[in-house]
Amino acid sequence: MNILIIGSGAREYSIALSLLNDSRLSHIYFCPGNGATSELGENIDIKDNKDIVVFCINNKIDLVVIGPEQPLCDGLSDELRNNNIRVFGPSKRAAMLEGSKIFMKNILKKYEIPTARFIEGNNKENLFSFIDSIESSKIVLKADGLCGGKGVIIAQNKDEAKSTLNDILNGKLFGEAGKQVVVEEFLDGYELSVFAICDGSDFIILPVAQDHKRLLDNDLGPNTGGMGAYSPTPLCNDKLLQDIKDSIIKPTLDAMKSENAEFSGVLFCGIMVVDNKPFVLEFNVRFGDPECEVILPLLKTPLLDILNASIDKKLANFTYEILQKYCVGVVVASQHYPFKSSPKEEITYSNINFLSNQISHISFAGVSRDNDRLYADGGRVFVAIGIGDSLSEAKNNAYNLTKNISFKGMIMRKDISNKAL
Ligand code: AMP
Ligand code: GLY
């Protein structure tokens, strides 16, 4: 079969690696892909949804997997479905769980799903009086719309919250995406990334991961797209996971059904655990990046079977197997990430496995190719993924891998997975 993967990051590279050794696969396309995905398949560059449909028909695409949130929020999956093309990813309406924080918070409130207490809108007087009523000293401000993962500000006190809110509402900080906001109380706990593959009614859970959002070791420095992840995490035991399924995932799928926005695809629940109780921080409607890169290698059941069961609404009786292994992913980024772009630098390497996710490997993101040379040409450049029988072995394997591949100015955290060790 022919598969088209939408996206250009390490997430999409890793999805392809998981599908690559499946004997059912004949050809894999990436739109737009990156300088390394062109070694796994063929990159195409089509921007318009209607043109993607035409490409799928002309090239007999059997399945489209949509990696990032923007095309989902733009309705690419609806366009494909309307043309009878199989697609893994939620509808535009269901993607509002990520596309609009106000939509998402109101679903949680209406169906009594645990989340931080909040207020929404653009009425400054109401927002300010809510801020005054909050008991936590820190206050969380969120732009309603998509901001590439950067639309959240944690104010350290009420005055800072109010002045930052002014800057958001007048468009200074987030432009149009911040014309409406969510203000909520700060939850103090630890975070988990929980991924449910859903078919509208039923779901299966993948191994639970933990992201490392801050730039520097010990969770210092600014927020980034994610500097590393590991899975499974011992910070989520069976009882907590059952609670997350019963009090968050199942009620959310039921709620979306009642709202005529049936959810199929990946529901990524950003969870804060406070006193052993899970609260929803956010939903994403796609795989997390870099979490995806450390979860997919743990699947024993072929990824293609999982995607098909979701599309065909067969998850209720679906059995799947997970390897008893650990996976640690260390993001290697360019010198000036996440502040500004960095000069393009050649990547040199030796003794690196590029073609299988069954052993420690590299997953590429911000890279370009010139003849046979690979260049660091983006913020997050690649992820070194270590696999092992224990978390510490996986961590060692990931960091050992980073010694075999380099470019000028590369940066990485040295403490990925330490929280669990
Ligand atoms: P979000 O995009 O909503 O997940 O927010 C990005 C990050 O901000 C989360 O991963 C948390 O680290 C932090 N965050 C968001 N909401 C809250 C909250 N209510 N309390 C504490 N931290 C939060
Ligand atoms: N790792 C967080 C995200 O993909 O948004």
Image (cartoon, grey):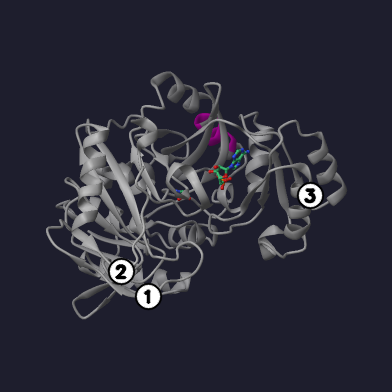
Return the residue at label 2: 408
How many numbered marks are there? 3
Q: Give the range drawn in magenta.
A: 249-255
Mark 3 and mark 2: Cα distance apart in space? 42 Å
Mark 1 and mark 3: Cα distance apart in space? 43 Å
**Does the beta carbon of the residue at mark 3 sit less than 8 Å from ligand 1?**
no
Does the magenta-highlighted stretch encompass residue 31?
Answer: no
The local secondary structure at tag 1 comes to loop
Mark 2 and mark 1: Cα distance apart in space? 29 Å
Main SS, magenta residues: helix
Residue in the picture at 55% in, 30% down: 189
Return the residue at label 1: 45
Residue in the picture at 75% in, 60% down: 167
Residue 36 relative to residue 250: left or right: left
Q: In which quarter of the image is residue 232?
A: top left
Residue that extends furthest to the top in the rendered view of this protein? 239
Q: Give the residue type that dot 2 points to.
A: Lys
Q: List x then y, in percent, for residue 137.
A: 71, 35
Return the residue at label 3: 162
358 w.r.t. 30: above or below: above
